[in-house]
Amino acid sequence: MSADEITVVHLMRHGEVENPSGILYGRLPGYHLSELGRKMADRVAEHLAGRDITHVVASPLERAQETATPVAQAHGVELGSDARLIEAGNVFQGKTFGVGDGALRKPANWRHLTNPFRPSWGEPYIDQVVRMTKALDAAAAAARGHEAVLVSHQLPIWTVRSYVERRRLWHDPRRRQCSLASLTSFTYRGDRIVSVGYSEPARDLVPEHLLPRR
């Protein structure tokens, strides 16, 4: 890659998922986009229609593949899969776990909540940084001089962005700037990231309670 060549890699979060039971689905298979989620995916594909996108890859989970499909189709490129873009591992996967559901009062869960800095309940932040950075760099190499779209999940996207922007990795999940179907865009000059941008092409479709706190 030329030292001055500009490449943009857009990290896109998947759209809304059909999950009426409120399960923390994590890496579980079988969770697909809702009707609203499909509208979000279409909206972002329309937003990116005029961009020079030559490479589209997604996490192997259904919701990510389904989000990426309209983008790949709009640009006539084959949709790829990269396991490095997968959701972060979490010991509470398959359970309901949220504010007000009583999960924090169950002694069996306490041992998983001892270290918010690693974190103790799931995949270490630094491991997410390593795999996501490799996925970003691979996409930048594949799309050199053009643009790429990678569809992933909120926590890995926010974690690698925090690393690139030199923020601490542990954080308040309610303040992640990574809403459904958002784009976190990394601009490379040569093989070095020189800037990070953020946009929400489908913001008007995102339920108010799911938007990040300001």
Image (tube, rainbow, N blue to C red):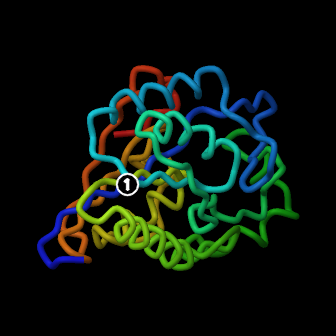
Task: Name the outermost residue toward the front.
Answer: 76
Return the residue nearer the eye: 38 or 166. 38
Q: Based on the displayed image, in which of its 4 quarters is residue 90 positioned?
A: bottom right
* Quadrant the C terminus occupies: top left
Relative to residue 53, is residue 34 depicted above or below? above
| Amino acid carrying mark 1 in the image | Ala
Residue at the spot x=43%, y=72% of the render?
138
Relative to residue 65, is residue 168 depicted above or below? below
Is residue 79 left or right of 214 when viewed as pictured? Answer: right
**Residue identifier under label 1:** 148
Residue at the spot x=62%, y=38% of the render?
66
Is residue 196 left or right of 44 when viewed as pictured? Answer: left
Relative to residue 47, is residue 60 depicted above or below? below
* Quadrant the N terminus occupies: bottom left
Q: Based on the displayed image, in which of its 4 quarters is residue 88 positioned?
A: bottom right
Residue 121 image point, x, y percent: 70, 68
Q: Based on the displayed image, in which of its 4 quarters is residue 193 positioned?
A: bottom left
